[in-house]
Amino acid sequence: MAVPKKKTSKSKTRSRRASAWSISAAPKSRCTHCGAMKLPHRACQSCGYYKGRQVVDV
């Protein structure tokens, strides 16, 4: 059974994972407060809400 000789570096691993985001469009979801499109697990850029409370002053 093949075993890697060297440990894969963090930059190599992260670079490989990041390429998947650049190939396809980033997934979007709707803001529950204002209904604007936003990236998942991020504060909304139009109203500043995240998980039902305001975290950023807009």
Image (spheres, rainbow, N blue to C red):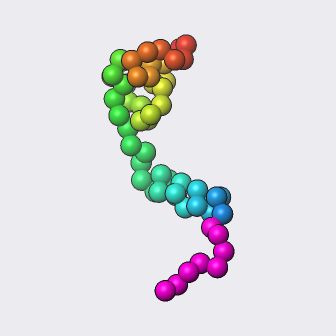
Place of residue 25 in the rendered image (x, y in percent of width and height, measured from the top left): 42, 48
Percent x, y for residue 37?
A: 38, 30
Where is residue 58 shown, x and y percent of the image? 53, 14
Q: Verify whether residue 5 appears in magenta.
A: yes
Quarter of the image holding residue 11? bottom right
Q: Is residue 7 left or right of residue 53?
A: right
Q: How many marks?
A: 0
Q: Is residue 18 visible?
A: yes
Residue at x 49% of width, y 86% of height: 1
Q: Which residue is painted at 52% across and 57% down in the image?
A: 17
Q: Is residue 23 above or below residue 50?
A: below
Q: Nearer the viewer, residue 15 or 9?
A: 9
Q: Which residues are magenta?
A: 1-8
Q: Give the x, y percent position of residue 12.
A: 62, 63
Q: Is residue 47 visible?
A: no
What residue is drawn where x is 34% and y is 29%? Answer: 30
| 5 relative to 35, above or below | below
25 relative to 17 in the view: left or right: left
**Front residue (pair 57, 52):** 52
For residue 18, side relative to residue 37 (left or right): right
Quarter holding residue 38? top left
**Residue 30 colored in magenta in the image:** no
Viewer-side residue, 32 vs 3: 3
Q: Is 20 located above or below residue 38 in the figure?
A: below
Vertical placement of residue 49 versus 40, above or below:
above
Q: Main secondary structure of the magenta part?
A: loop
